[in-house]
Protein backbone atom coordinates (compact mmCIF):
# COMPACT_ATOMS: atom_id res chain seq x y z
CA UNK A 1 0.00 0.00 0.00
CA UNK A 2 1.55 3.27 -1.04
CA UNK A 3 1.24 6.29 1.24
CA UNK A 4 -1.54 7.75 -0.99
CA UNK A 5 -3.62 4.56 -0.62
CA UNK A 6 -3.00 4.46 3.13
CA UNK A 7 -4.29 8.01 3.45
CA UNK A 8 -7.37 7.15 1.36
CA UNK A 9 -8.03 4.05 3.52
CA UNK A 10 -7.69 6.06 6.72
CA UNK A 11 -10.14 8.70 5.45
CA UNK A 12 -12.70 6.04 4.41
CA UNK A 13 -12.43 4.31 7.82
CA UNK A 14 -12.89 7.61 9.62
CA UNK A 15 -16.00 8.36 7.58
CA UNK A 16 -17.48 4.90 8.28
CA UNK A 17 -16.77 5.16 12.06
CA UNK A 18 -18.30 8.62 12.35
CA UNK A 19 -21.37 7.47 10.39
CA UNK A 20 -21.89 4.50 12.77
CA UNK A 21 -21.45 6.82 15.77
CA UNK A 22 -23.97 9.24 14.32
CA UNK A 23 -26.52 6.47 13.74
CA UNK A 24 -26.18 5.33 17.39
CA UNK A 25 -26.47 8.85 18.70
CA UNK A 26 -29.56 9.69 16.73
CA UNK A 27 -31.27 6.38 17.66
CA UNK A 28 -30.64 7.21 21.33
CA UNK A 29 -32.10 10.70 20.88
CA UNK A 30 -35.11 9.27 19.15
CA UNK A 31 -35.69 6.79 22.02
CA UNK A 32 -35.46 9.62 24.57
CA UNK A 33 -37.79 11.77 22.54
CA UNK A 34 -40.34 8.98 22.32
CA UNK A 35 -40.26 7.97 25.97
CA UNK A 36 -40.61 11.56 27.17
CA UNK A 37 -42.89 12.65 24.37
CA UNK A 38 -46.13 12.96 26.39
CA UNK A 39 -44.46 14.77 29.26
CA UNK A 40 -42.76 17.17 26.89
CA UNK A 41 -45.87 18.11 24.89
CA UNK A 42 -47.05 21.45 26.18
CA UNK A 43 -50.72 21.58 27.27
CA UNK A 44 -51.52 23.45 24.09
CA UNK A 45 -50.90 20.30 22.11
CA UNK A 46 -52.57 17.84 24.45
CA UNK A 47 -55.60 17.75 22.24
CA UNK A 48 -53.52 17.14 19.15
CA UNK A 49 -54.58 14.08 17.24
CA UNK A 50 -52.64 10.96 18.42
CA UNK A 51 -51.35 10.21 14.96
CA UNK A 52 -48.98 13.15 15.32
CA UNK A 53 -46.55 10.80 17.07
CA UNK A 54 -47.84 7.34 16.22
CA UNK A 55 -48.64 5.90 12.85
CA UNK A 56 -52.35 6.30 12.23
CA UNK A 57 -54.50 3.28 13.02
CA UNK A 58 -56.32 1.82 10.10
CA UNK A 59 -59.86 3.05 10.57
CA UNK A 60 -62.83 1.37 9.05
CA UNK A 61 -64.26 3.67 6.42
CA UNK A 62 -67.85 4.32 7.40
CA UNK A 63 -70.46 4.02 4.70
CA UNK A 64 -71.08 7.37 3.06
CA UNK A 65 -73.89 9.29 4.79
CA UNK A 66 -77.25 9.67 3.10
CA UNK A 67 -77.62 12.88 1.09
CA UNK A 68 -78.39 15.93 3.28
CA UNK A 69 -82.15 16.53 3.30
CA UNK A 70 -83.39 19.90 2.06
CA UNK A 71 -83.73 22.42 4.92
CA UNK A 72 -87.23 22.31 6.39
CA UNK A 73 -89.18 25.60 6.35
CA UNK A 74 -90.07 27.11 9.73
CA UNK A 75 -92.87 25.35 11.53
CA UNK A 76 -96.23 26.77 10.47
CA UNK A 77 -99.37 26.25 12.50
CA UNK A 78 -102.00 24.61 10.34
CA UNK A 79 -104.65 26.81 11.81
CA UNK A 80 -104.59 30.25 13.40
CA UNK A 81 -107.32 29.86 15.96
CA UNK A 82 -108.08 31.39 19.33
CA UNK A 83 -108.73 29.21 22.39
CA UNK A 84 -112.30 27.84 22.40
CA UNK A 85 -113.61 30.46 24.86
CA UNK A 86 -113.03 33.25 22.29
CA UNK A 87 -114.67 31.59 19.28
CA UNK A 88 -117.81 33.40 18.18
CA UNK A 89 -116.85 36.32 20.44
CA UNK A 90 -115.74 39.91 19.84
CA UNK A 91 -112.39 40.91 21.33
CA UNK A 92 -111.07 44.46 21.67
CA UNK A 93 -108.00 43.68 23.75
CA UNK A 94 -106.72 40.98 26.06
CA UNK A 95 -106.59 41.10 29.84
CA UNK A 96 -103.03 40.22 30.68
CA UNK A 97 -101.49 41.35 33.94
CA UNK A 98 -98.50 39.03 34.36
CA UNK A 99 -96.58 40.01 31.24
CA UNK A 100 -96.07 43.06 29.00
CA UNK A 101 -97.32 42.03 25.57
CA UNK A 102 -98.86 43.88 22.65
CA UNK A 103 -100.38 42.64 19.38
CA UNK A 104 -99.79 44.72 16.26
CA UNK A 105 -102.30 44.10 13.47
CA UNK A 106 -102.15 45.12 9.80
CA UNK A 107 -105.25 45.33 7.60
CA UNK A 108 -106.01 45.42 3.87
CA UNK A 109 -102.96 43.55 2.54
CA UNK A 110 -101.18 41.68 1.29
CA UNK A 111 -99.57 44.26 -1.02
CA UNK A 112 -95.96 45.05 -1.93
CA UNK A 113 -96.06 47.43 1.09
CA UNK A 114 -96.39 44.34 3.30
CA UNK A 115 -92.80 43.39 2.46
CA UNK A 116 -91.49 46.65 3.94
CA UNK A 117 -93.45 45.99 7.14
CA UNK A 118 -92.15 42.41 7.32
CA UNK A 119 -88.63 43.77 7.01
CA UNK A 120 -89.05 46.09 10.03
CA UNK A 121 -90.69 43.33 12.08
CA UNK A 122 -87.85 40.93 11.28
CA UNK A 123 -85.21 43.55 12.06
CA UNK A 124 -86.63 43.81 15.58
CA UNK A 125 -87.52 40.15 15.98
CA UNK A 126 -91.22 41.00 16.34
CA UNK A 127 -94.35 39.29 14.98
CA UNK A 128 -97.80 40.60 14.13
CA UNK A 129 -101.17 39.57 12.69
CA UNK A 130 -102.19 40.41 9.12
CA UNK A 131 -105.90 40.66 8.24
CA UNK A 132 -105.94 40.08 4.51
CA UNK A 133 -108.40 40.84 1.73
CA UNK A 134 -109.28 37.87 -0.47
CA UNK A 135 -108.74 39.81 -3.67
CA UNK A 136 -105.24 40.81 -2.55
CA UNK A 137 -104.44 37.24 -1.54
CA UNK A 138 -105.33 36.19 -5.08
CA UNK A 139 -103.05 38.87 -6.51
CA UNK A 140 -100.10 38.47 -4.12
CA UNK A 141 -100.13 34.88 -2.82
CA UNK A 142 -96.33 34.82 -2.47
CA UNK A 143 -96.42 37.81 -0.13
CA UNK A 144 -99.05 36.12 2.04
CA UNK A 145 -96.86 33.03 2.15
CA UNK A 146 -93.94 35.11 3.32
CA UNK A 147 -96.10 36.69 6.05
CA UNK A 148 -96.82 33.27 7.53
CA UNK A 149 -93.33 31.88 6.95
CA UNK A 150 -91.89 34.78 8.94
CA UNK A 151 -93.83 33.64 12.03
CA UNK A 152 -96.78 36.02 11.73
CA UNK A 153 -100.44 35.11 11.99
CA UNK A 154 -102.94 35.69 9.21
CA UNK A 155 -106.63 36.57 9.45
CA UNK A 156 -109.70 37.11 7.27
CA UNK A 157 -110.76 40.66 6.31
CA UNK A 158 -113.36 39.68 3.63
CA UNK A 159 -112.98 39.80 -0.15
CA UNK A 160 -114.28 43.26 -1.10
CA UNK A 161 -114.11 45.24 2.16
CA UNK A 162 -117.83 46.13 2.08
CA UNK A 163 -119.19 48.55 4.68
CA UNK A 164 -122.84 48.25 3.63
CA UNK A 165 -125.35 45.67 4.83
CA UNK A 166 -124.96 42.28 3.20
CA UNK A 167 -127.12 39.17 2.96
CA UNK A 168 -125.91 35.95 4.54
CA UNK A 169 -125.14 34.63 1.06
CA UNK A 170 -122.88 37.63 0.32
CA UNK A 171 -121.27 37.35 3.74
CA UNK A 172 -120.57 33.71 3.05
CA UNK A 173 -118.97 34.58 -0.31
CA UNK A 174 -116.92 37.37 1.23
CA UNK A 175 -115.57 35.34 4.13
CA UNK A 176 -115.48 31.77 2.79
CA UNK A 177 -113.69 32.66 -0.46
CA UNK A 178 -111.16 34.72 1.44
CA UNK A 179 -110.62 31.69 3.70
CA UNK A 180 -110.04 29.53 0.63
CA UNK A 181 -107.39 31.97 -0.62
CA UNK A 182 -105.70 32.09 2.79
CA UNK A 183 -105.38 28.32 2.49
CA UNK A 184 -104.28 28.40 -1.15
CA UNK A 185 -101.54 30.96 -0.56
CA UNK A 186 -100.24 29.93 2.87
CA UNK A 187 -101.40 26.34 3.42
CA UNK A 188 -103.03 27.45 6.67
CA UNK A 189 -106.54 28.12 7.94
CA UNK A 190 -107.58 30.98 10.13
CA UNK A 191 -110.37 31.58 12.61
CA UNK A 192 -109.44 35.24 13.05
CA UNK A 193 -111.78 37.81 11.51
CA UNK A 194 -111.61 41.56 11.34
CA UNK A 195 -114.68 43.36 10.04
CA UNK A 196 -113.97 46.03 7.39
CA UNK A 197 -114.10 49.47 8.98
CA UNK A 198 -114.85 47.80 12.30
CA UNK A 199 -118.53 47.51 11.31
CA UNK A 200 -120.18 44.96 13.55
CA UNK A 201 -123.77 45.22 12.34
CA UNK A 202 -123.77 44.82 8.55
CA UNK A 203 -124.02 41.02 8.49
CA UNK A 204 -120.32 40.20 8.03
CA UNK A 205 -119.36 39.92 11.70
CA UNK A 206 -122.55 37.98 12.42
CA UNK A 207 -121.65 35.41 9.77
CA UNK A 208 -118.04 35.18 11.07
CA UNK A 209 -119.28 34.58 14.61
CA UNK A 210 -121.65 31.89 13.37
CA UNK A 211 -118.65 30.22 11.70
CA UNK A 212 -116.72 30.22 14.98
CA UNK A 213 -114.31 33.02 14.12
CA UNK A 214 -113.13 35.38 16.84
CA UNK A 215 -114.01 38.93 15.74
CA UNK A 216 -110.85 40.90 16.42
CA UNK A 217 -111.34 44.63 16.99
CA UNK A 218 -108.64 46.89 18.48
CA UNK A 219 -107.88 49.09 21.47
CA UNK A 220 -105.42 51.52 19.81
CA UNK A 221 -106.11 53.27 16.49
CA UNK A 222 -103.41 55.76 15.46
CA UNK A 223 -105.32 56.41 12.20
CA UNK A 224 -102.38 55.61 9.94
CA UNK A 225 -104.88 55.34 7.03
CA UNK A 226 -105.16 59.17 7.16
CA UNK A 227 -101.43 59.35 6.28
CA UNK A 228 -100.58 60.91 9.62
CA UNK A 229 -96.90 61.79 10.08
CA UNK A 230 -94.84 58.86 11.41
CA UNK A 231 -94.19 60.65 14.72
CA UNK A 232 -97.94 61.16 15.29
CA UNK A 233 -98.70 57.49 14.59
CA UNK A 234 -95.82 56.41 16.83
CA UNK A 235 -96.73 58.77 19.69
CA UNK A 236 -100.36 57.62 19.72
CA UNK A 237 -99.36 53.97 19.97
CA UNK A 238 -96.60 54.54 22.53
CA UNK A 239 -98.70 56.79 24.78
CA UNK A 240 -101.67 54.38 24.80
CA UNK A 241 -99.63 51.18 25.11
CA UNK A 242 -100.65 48.74 27.81
CA UNK A 243 -100.34 45.01 28.20
CA UNK A 244 -102.90 43.12 26.12
CA UNK A 245 -103.45 46.03 23.71
CA UNK A 246 -104.36 45.40 20.07
CA UNK A 247 -103.03 48.05 17.65
CA UNK A 248 -104.74 48.78 14.32
CA UNK A 249 -102.38 49.55 11.42
CA UNK A 250 -102.52 49.02 7.65
CA UNK A 251 -100.33 47.34 5.03
CA UNK A 252 -102.72 48.09 2.16
CA UNK A 253 -104.98 50.85 0.85
CA UNK A 254 -102.21 53.09 -0.48
CA UNK A 255 -98.57 53.84 0.16
CA UNK A 256 -97.62 52.92 3.71
CA UNK A 257 -94.38 54.87 4.03
CA UNK A 258 -95.57 56.61 7.22
CA UNK A 259 -96.74 53.36 8.79
CA UNK A 260 -93.40 51.66 8.05
CA UNK A 261 -91.47 54.60 9.45
CA UNK A 262 -93.70 54.76 12.55
CA UNK A 263 -93.21 51.05 13.10
CA UNK A 264 -89.47 51.48 13.26
CA UNK A 265 -90.02 53.98 16.09
CA UNK A 266 -92.78 52.07 17.94
CA UNK A 267 -91.14 48.65 18.21
CA UNK A 268 -87.75 49.63 19.69
CA UNK A 269 -89.37 52.17 22.03
CA UNK A 270 -91.89 49.70 23.45
CA UNK A 271 -89.27 46.97 23.64
CA UNK A 272 -87.22 49.37 25.70
CA UNK A 273 -90.21 49.63 28.06
CA UNK A 274 -90.23 45.83 28.39
CA UNK A 275 -92.98 44.94 25.89
CA UNK A 276 -92.95 41.87 23.65
CA UNK A 277 -94.87 41.65 20.38
CA UNK A 278 -97.11 38.63 19.88
CA UNK A 279 -99.72 37.43 17.39
CA UNK A 280 -103.46 37.52 18.19
CA UNK A 281 -103.63 33.74 18.85
CA UNK A 282 -100.62 34.02 21.17
CA UNK A 283 -102.18 36.99 22.96
CA UNK A 284 -105.48 35.18 23.52
CA UNK A 285 -103.72 32.00 24.61
CA UNK A 286 -101.86 34.03 27.23
CA UNK A 287 -105.12 35.41 28.59
CA UNK A 288 -106.68 31.93 28.64
CA UNK A 289 -103.63 30.47 30.44
CA UNK A 290 -103.65 33.27 32.98
CA UNK A 291 -107.26 32.62 33.98
CA UNK A 292 -106.69 28.89 34.62
ZN1 LIG B 1 -109.74 47.29 6.28
Image (spheres, helix red, strand yellow):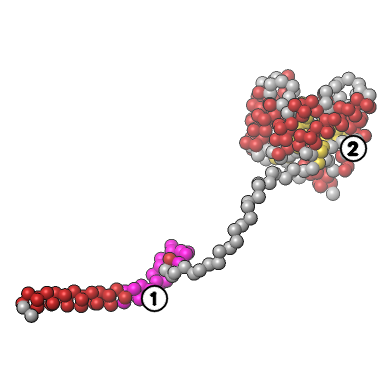
Please name the residue shown 90% across and 34% down the image.
Answer: 209
- Which stretch appears magenta? 28-51
* Residue at the spot of label 2: 212
Give the vertical position of 193 relative to 11 (above or below). Answer: above
* Location of residue 116 (image quadrant): top right
With 275 as the anchor, is 65 left or right in this view? left
* Location of residue 34 (image quadrant): bottom left
Q: Position of residue 137 (x, y in %)?
A: 77, 29
Q: Position of residue 257 (x, y in %)?
A: 66, 23
Please name the residue shown 66% across and 27% down the image.
Answer: 260
Give the vertical position of 108 relative to 42 (above or below). Answer: above
Is mark 2 in CB contact (under 8 Å) with mark 1? Answer: no
With 172 as the anchor, is 261 left or right in this view? left
Q: Is residue 105 magenta?
A: no
**What kind of element bears circle 1?**
helix
Give the vertical position of 31 relative to 155 (above or below). Answer: below
For label 2, the crowd category at 10 Å Cα-Cα, with few meaning under 14, some 14 to 19 and many 20 or more, is: some
Mark-to-mark CA distance, 2 and 1 = 80 Å
Please name the residue shown 29% across and 73% down the image.
Answer: 26
Q: Looking at mark 2, is its residue's CB closer than 8 Å to ligand 1?
A: no
Residue furthest left as drawn: 3
Q: Is residue 37 magenta?
A: yes
Q: Which mark is residue 35?
A: 1
Of 82 and 170, the residue lying toward us: 170
**What kind of element bears circle 2?**
loop
Of 232 and 239, the residue lying toward us: 232
Q: Position of residue 117 (x, y in %)?
A: 67, 30
- Residue 103 visible to an observer of this rendering: no
* Location of residue 118 (image quadrant): top right
Amino acid sequence: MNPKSTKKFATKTAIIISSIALIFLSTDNLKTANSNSLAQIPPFFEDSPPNLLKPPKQKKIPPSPPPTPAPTPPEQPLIFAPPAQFRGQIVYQANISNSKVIALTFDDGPTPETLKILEVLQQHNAVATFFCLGRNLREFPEIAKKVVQSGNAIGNHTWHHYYHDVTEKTASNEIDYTGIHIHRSTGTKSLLFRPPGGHLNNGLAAYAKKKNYVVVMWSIDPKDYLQQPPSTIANTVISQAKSGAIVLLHDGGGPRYNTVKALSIIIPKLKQQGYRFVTIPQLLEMQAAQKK
